[in-house]
Amino acid sequence: MNVRIALGIITLSACCITHAALKTKPEVFDKTAWEQPQKSFRIYGNTYYVGSKGLSAILIASPDGEILIDGTLAKNAPMIEANIRALGFKLKDIKLILNSHAHSDHAGGIAAIARDSGAPVAASVKGAKAIMLGGDDPDDPQHGDAPLYPKVDSVRSVADNETVHVGSLAVQAHYTPGHTPGSTTWTWTSCEGKRCLSMVYADSLSLLSADGYRYNDPAHPERLDAFRQALKTIAALPCDILMVPHQDAIDFLTRAMRRRPGEKTDPLIDPQACKAYAATGQDNLEKRIAKEAAEAPAH
């Protein structure tokens, strides 16, 4: 089954999730849920949730093979693999593994899943570097605090706005640096019958960092510029269904459980989701900048 990475842009239809659902604080998570099993389920069309209760892993399926986005924690790899099998898919049919950002809670399981499936791994240029370092990236805001994880020996680099393909599947990369230098948002289209929706797996917008790291650093003005551009990128995306690495940041599983067969309204679909998610990120960024200014030593 052919896997190729080619330039291209997917034309996506408009849409997204509920603004109220995105009012949660994306920097506060229930870490006990990170390792708790979650039954895999269909999100929409050929898109499935195969992660734990607290950490997302997304499977996109086709007759030509599957694409997996994120592997969660290293210790979760057997759980993710079991979730994929529970849907009726075979590990050997995973033809590409992508990553949102290179922290242990999203990239930790990738080495094991890649080994067990034989699938190649791809990420943004800076994300690929960090995964091959096992998370030991000196440019990461959390460097020194973030746990390390099993390295992946070979990771393909995907350019900004590049589209990766597995058979009929086409998934586009959007660089959204800030949480990490290599943070990437992925978009694709999933269909049920004649109804096709724009799917967005937007990366984390958390501002957690090691002591001493400043986003508004005069010596590194590119940090703040990049984060602000990332927020604009996410806000501008067509996104009928928004997914994020920490599902509880947008109450994704809670809303998924509210789905009822036959109901016309789907709690996961909201045409304002990406804008609301970016707006929350913008608010948190401005608060962080103000905090850094207040804590800066007087001259």
Image (cartoon, rainbow, N blue to C red):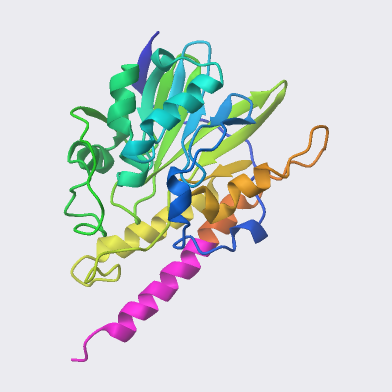
- Residue 241, how many percent across, how many down? 61, 41
Q: Quadrant of the C terminus?
A: bottom left
Count how many numbered circles sit on residues in the image: 0
Q: Residue at coordinates 54% horizontally, 38% vertically from top-left? A: 38
Asked whether residue 291 appears in the rendered view, the answer is: yes
Residue 281 lies within the magenta run = yes
Q: Residue furthest bottom?
A: 299
Q: Residue at coordinates 17% horizontally, 41% vertically from top-left? A: 133
Q: Examine the image and state in which quarter residue 111 appears.
A: top left
Q: Examine the image and state in which quarter residue 156 appears.
A: top left
**Most common SS among magenta residues:** helix
Judged left or right of residue 163, residue 39 is right
Q: Residue furthest top?
A: 1
- Residue 145, how many percent across, how many down? 23, 59
Q: Residue at coordinates 48% horizontally, 56% vertically from top-left? A: 30
- Nearest the eye: 169 or 97: 97
- Nearest the eye: 35 or 170: 35
Q: Which residues are magenta?
A: 280-299
Asked whether residue 120 appears in the rendered view, the answer is: no
Q: Residue at coordinates 20% horizontally, 27% vertically from top-left? A: 154
- Residue 132, how many percent across, how many down? 19, 36
- Residue 197, how many percent across, how many down? 64, 33
Residue 113 lies within the magenta run = no
Q: Quadrant of the N terminus?
A: top left
